[in-house]
Image: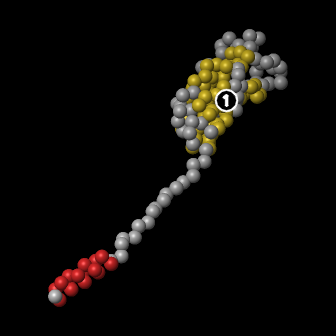
Amino acid sequence: MLRISLLAGVALCLAAAPQANAATVNLSGLVLNSCILTLGTAGALRVSSAGTTLSSEEVGGLAATLTIVATGVAPQINVSAPTLAASPVSYGRSPTLGLRYTSLAGGNQAYTDSSSSYTANGLLDVLTFNARALDSAGFTSGTYTIATTVTCQQ
């Protein structure tokens, strides 16, 4: 009988043993939509041998590059119409402007004098810009700047 009691006592102790504790572990984070724009290379304009085209694609010219790092999903890239931001005072005319760009994340715009936009298919993008100014009367000596503004929104 002592044996039965001892076995019953062990079984009772095992049944009364505390259950294992459980805890839920949560890991959370907040993603804020943002875009960081960094100019990689400033472009350089050169005049054509005929003197009627000023372009980053002429011999000695250089395309501009801009890097975009975004968080969130599918950033919308907006590019403003090109403007003649600087020219010699003696120039005094309005050339026909054009801007074109390509990007690693799907942007591809032929020369245009209007604003444009595209939705990037990635969160990292590098845009390459070329610009030109056309004037059949030619360009006077001095410094010229063609500018555009790029914005990124989510």
Q: Is residue 37 above or below residue 141?
A: below
Placement of 34 over or under 41, stated as above or below: below
How is this picture coloured?
secondary structure
Query: Measured from the top left, where is residue 102 in percent x and y?
Result: 57, 26
Instruction: Name, please, the residue furthest toward the front.
Output: 1
Q: Tell me which residue sits at (46%, 62%) in the image.
A: 25
| Residue 40: image location, x then y, percent | 59, 37
Residue 80 location in percent, x, y? 70, 28
Is 27 above or below relative to 152? Answer: below
Instruction: Using the rendered image of the protein, determine whether residue 59 is visible from the camera's viewpoint.
Output: yes
Residue at image position (56%, 39%) is: 73
Q: Kindly identify the residue that appears in the image at 33 percent across and 78 percent down.
A: 16
Q: Is residue 129 above or below residue 23?
A: above
| In-front residue for pair 61/23 | 23
Comparing 15 with 153, the one in front is: 15
Q: Is residue 148 left or right of residue 13?
A: right
Give the residue at x 36% y 76%. Answer: 18
Residue 56 makes an appearance in the image: no
x, y percentage for residue 136? 74, 10
Quarter of the image with the N terminus in it:
bottom left
In this figure, what is the number of numbered marks?
1
Three-letter code, disc 1: Val
Q: Quadrant of the C terminus?
A: top right
- Secondary structure at numbered mark 1: strand
Location of mark 1 (residue): 79
In this orientation, which residue lies closer to the viewer: 76 or 115?
A: 76
Q: Quadrant of residue 101?
A: top right
